Amino acid sequence: MRSKFNGELSGIVFLILAIGASVFIGKEMLFAVLAIIVLLAQLGIYTFLLKRRGKLFWVYAVALVTEIVFLVTKEFWIFALAILLLIVAGVWNVFFADEVRMSGKVFLVIRRVLYGVVAVVASVFWIVNIYAQPITRSVTLPADLTAEINNDQLDSPTIMLDNIEKMNSIGSRTTGSEGHNQFIAWLQQQVTDMGLTVYRDKYTFDRWEEKSSSVIIGNEEIHVSSAFPYSGETDSNGVTGELVYTKPGEYEEAKDNIAVVEIKNLKNFPMALVMNIRDTFQAPGGVPSDEGDLVLTTGLKHAKLEEAKEQGVKAVIIVLDGVSDEKAEKQYLPFTEHYFGIPAVWVNKTAGQKVINAAKEHKAGTVILEAEEQENAPTESFYVKIEGKNKKESIIINTHTDGVNVVEENGAIGMLSMIRYLQQQEQPERTMIFTFVTGHFRLPEFKGTSQATSTWMQAHPELWDGNNGHLKAVAGLTVEHLGSLEWKDNASGEYGPTGEISTEFAYAGNEIMEAIWKKAVEDRSNTRTVILRGHNKFQFGESQPLFNAGIPMIGLIPMPDYLLVDSANREMDKFDVNLMREQVGSLLQALQLIDRTETSELGTADRYSFFLGRTK
C-alpha cells in the first residue's frame, strides 16, 4: 500500500514538473533543480525504504543524470529529453508500477482518467516545445565583425526635426486620408530627389473618417474622448433614445435606444501571454505590466457592436474605466476592426459617470457622429532600391506611412535619413529594399496574412522569396515609433512623464539577430532595450510578416501609451529628436552588421515560442 501511494503521488509530481518546465519559459533551471530534488528523494526511497531496484529505479537514475547535464550545458535537446523522462516516470508510476484492481471501484477509475488527462497535457506541451524550441542561447559575433556610424554623415537633429515638422504640418494621416496621401507624395518626392526610382502599388478601399462627434443629455453636452473608428455614423441631428446601461453583448433591452457600456482597462495584463524576452540591455524592469494597455484592452475586450447592430440599438456609448481622463483623450482605438454600421463613441470615466447616472434614471440622450465616407478611396505603398554587389540577395527595410501623431508613424522619416546616409557609403553587398507600406490603420482591408507588409510581400515575391531567379531576402529591419518618451498614469491616476524613454522593444528573429542588435545599441548612452521573440502568435508591428516568412529580422517598436493619440499637437511634447537620431544610428549599424554577415550565419527565423513567456 505504501509503495502504491508513493507511486501515484510521485507520478503526479513528475507530470506537474514536466508541465511546469514546458510552460514557464525562463524557469527551466528552477524546474530542473526541483526535479533533481524529487528524483533524489525517490532514489532514496527505493534504495533505503523499499529496498529494491526495478526498472523504474533506473529510469529515475537516467532522469537525474539528464537534469544535471542540462543544468551544466543549458542545451535545449537535453532539456527536452529531461522533460520526456519526467513524463515517462510519471506515467509509469501512475499506471504501471503496481497492479491495481479497479473492478467495481469507480473512484479509482475516475482518478486514473484524471491522471491520464494530466499525462496527455504534459505530452502535448512537450511536443509543442519540441516544435518551438523555446530555449535559445546567446551567441557572440566574430571579433572582426564591426560597423561604425560616421555622425558627420548622418542627418543632424535639425534636419530630422524639419522633416518631422513637415510630417506633422500635414495633420492626421489615417489610411487613405488627404493627409496620408500628401505625406506619401512628399516621401516619394524626397526619394526621387535622391536619385532613386519609386515603384508604386496602388489600392482602393472604402474609407471612413470622423468629422465630429458629441453626446447630449438634456441641455448638457457630455465630453466625448474620441469616436470609435469605422463604427458608424449619423446625420447632423444624431440619434436620440433612452440611455440603457448594460453590458457588452447584452443589448436586448436597448433596442431602439442608446446603449451605455463600460470597458475596464487591462492595466496589469499578464504580458507573459503576448511577449517573451530574449535579453535586455539597460532595462532592468523588463516588460512593464501596463505597456500598450489601451491597445490590448480594446483589442481583447470588445464592445460587441455587431450584436448591438443586430439588436436594433441606435448607438453605443462606451465608458473607458481604469484610465485617467487625460490618457483616454483622442485615442484612435481600436484601429483593427471592420466597419460596423452603428455609431459608437468613447467617453472617459468622469464623463462616463454622468452618462451612467443618466441611464440609471432612464433619461434620454442624443449621440451625434458625423463621418466622411469615401468609396474606392485611393492609397498606395511604394518601395525604392539601393542596388548591392550581390544580385541574388536582398535585405528588406520596412515601415508603414499611415498614422496619427509624431511617433505613429515616423519610421518613414527615419528611413529617409538611413537612405541619405547609405548613399554616402560604399555600395552594399546586398540589394536593400526600402519599403513604405500603407494599410496599417486599415488592417481589415490590408492585413494579408498578418500585418500590412504581408500584402506588399504577396505582390512582390520577386524581391524576397528566392524562387525562380527571384531575390532572396536574407534579413529584414523594421523601423517604427522613433524618439518616444515614456508617459504613464501614476499611482494617483495622474498622467505625465516618468523621466524615462519608452521601452525600446526590438523583436529579433533568431540568436544572431539578437546579437547584432545588442552590438548596435551597446555604446548608446540612452537606451532601454528589451529584445523579444514572437510569442503565442503575437508579434506587434510590421516586422511580423517578415518573421512569418522565415526571414531573420530585427523590428524596433517602442509602444508608448500615447501611440494612437490623434491630438492637435501630434504629441510633440512626448518626442525627443536626439533619441530618434540615436535610434536611427543603431538601425544603420545593425543594417551594416547584417550586410557584412555571411548568409549561412544569418540563418532563418525561429518559430514562435508558446505558453508563458519571460518578462523580466
Image: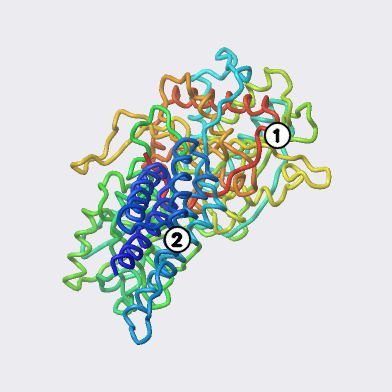
Q: Nearer the viewer, residue 356 or 298?
A: 298
Q: CA distance from mark 1 to mark 2?
A: 35 Å
Q: Which residue bears the numbered disc 1? A: 600
Percent coordinates x, y for residue 492 in the rendering: 18, 42
Percent coordinates x, y for residue 294 in the rendering: 36, 50
Tell me: 132 left or right of 93: right
Kindly identify the residue that appears in the image at 36 percent across and 42 percent down: 561
Determine if residue 232 is in view. Answer: no
Q: Which residue bears the numbered disc 2? A: 122
Q: Residues within 10 Å of mark 2 (few under 14, many from 20)?
A: many
Mark 1 or 2: the one toward you: 2
| Colour scheme in use | rainbow
Tell me: 19 left or right of 376: left
Kindly identify the residue that appears in the image at 53 percent across and 21 percent down: 159
Kindly identify the residue that appears in the image at 42 percent across and 50 percent down: 21
Q: Earlier in the sequence, mark 1 or mark 2?
A: 2
Kindly identify the residue that appears in the image at 34 percent across and 40 percent down: 288
Percent coordinates x, y for residue 89 in the rendering: 44, 59
Number of callouts in the render?
Answer: 2
Q: Residue reaching furthest top? A: 152
Percent coordinates x, y for residue 280 in the rendering: 43, 32
